[in-house]
Image: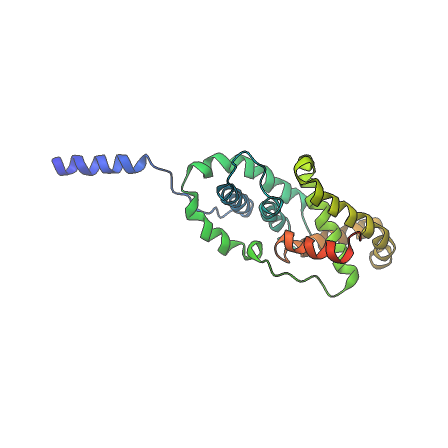
Amino acid sequence: MKAIALTAAAALLSSCGPERLELPAEPRDRAATCGVIAAIEARAATTDIKAPLPFEAQEHILHYALLAGAEGESFSSATANAVIKRMSELQAEITEGKWQDLVAPCREAFPQAQASEVKLPGDRFEAQLQCDELGDFLTTALQSQDQHYAARLNDYDGLARNLNQRLGPGLRARAGGLEAQQEARRKALAAAAKLGSPSAVMKQCVERYGEN
């Protein structure tokens, strides 16, 4: 009887700890979960818990939404936005659970999010279009925090100014009408998301095509 009581007590104590977590099978939830894991890891690495996360960490977190939106050949903004919204919904549950158990599964599920060695397309126009679309996505996502990331966002704004002047005629020549041009942009963003780390991609973009 005493042994049974001890076993029951041990089970009760173990159930009071952080809950075990599993990587969701549903694609949007899986991407959102791994985005939250990236945010937790980034926060754990900071010495000042009240300070904004580094710009590169924010881009890394957003990469999971980018990859979810880029699952097909054409980028889905609706999917990416749904993943970003889901991150907020899942944050408390994941933070309170055994989030460390999901670090390795997330790296396996999203290898492109770990890729720091990136290469822009050899086609100059396609490279510029991908840079323009990726920069626009990141700027839109992070512009509400401009006071913290002003310098980097200014670099992206300069890139956009340079590229907007160059891309218009070429896009019309290659794609034709407005809908075709928009589709070409969506495909370019999907391709850019799959290149690897957004920070690494944008570093190359700014160096090549930004304002000098």
Q: Which residue is drawn at 27% across and 35% down?
A: 13
Asked if one can make out residue 73 in the rendered structure from this viewpoint, the answer is no
- Counting every numbered tag in the picture gives 0
In front here: 72 or 48?
48
Q: Residue at x 45, y 48 (%)?
A: 102
In the image, residue 168 above or below residue 139: below
In the image, residue 8 above or below residue 77: above
**Image quadrant assignment for residue 173:** bottom right
**Image quadrant assignment for residue 19:** top left
Whole-percent x, y for residue 49 in the image: 51, 36
- The N terminus, quarter of image: top left
Q: Which residue is drawn at 54% across and 45% down?
A: 35
Asked if one can make out residue 42 in the rendered structure from this viewpoint, the answer is yes
Outermost residue toward the bottom?
A: 122
Whole-percent x, y for residue 77 in the image: 68, 44
In front here: 118 or 63?
118
Outermost residue toward the left?
A: 1
In front here: 16 or 135?
135
Outermost residue toward the front?
A: 47
Q: Which residue is drawn at 69% across and 37% down?
A: 146
In the image, residue 136 above or below residue 203: above
Whole-percent x, y for residue 135 in the image: 72, 48
In the rendered structure, the answer to whether residue 208 lies left or right of residue 58 reads: right
In front here: 114 or 75?
114
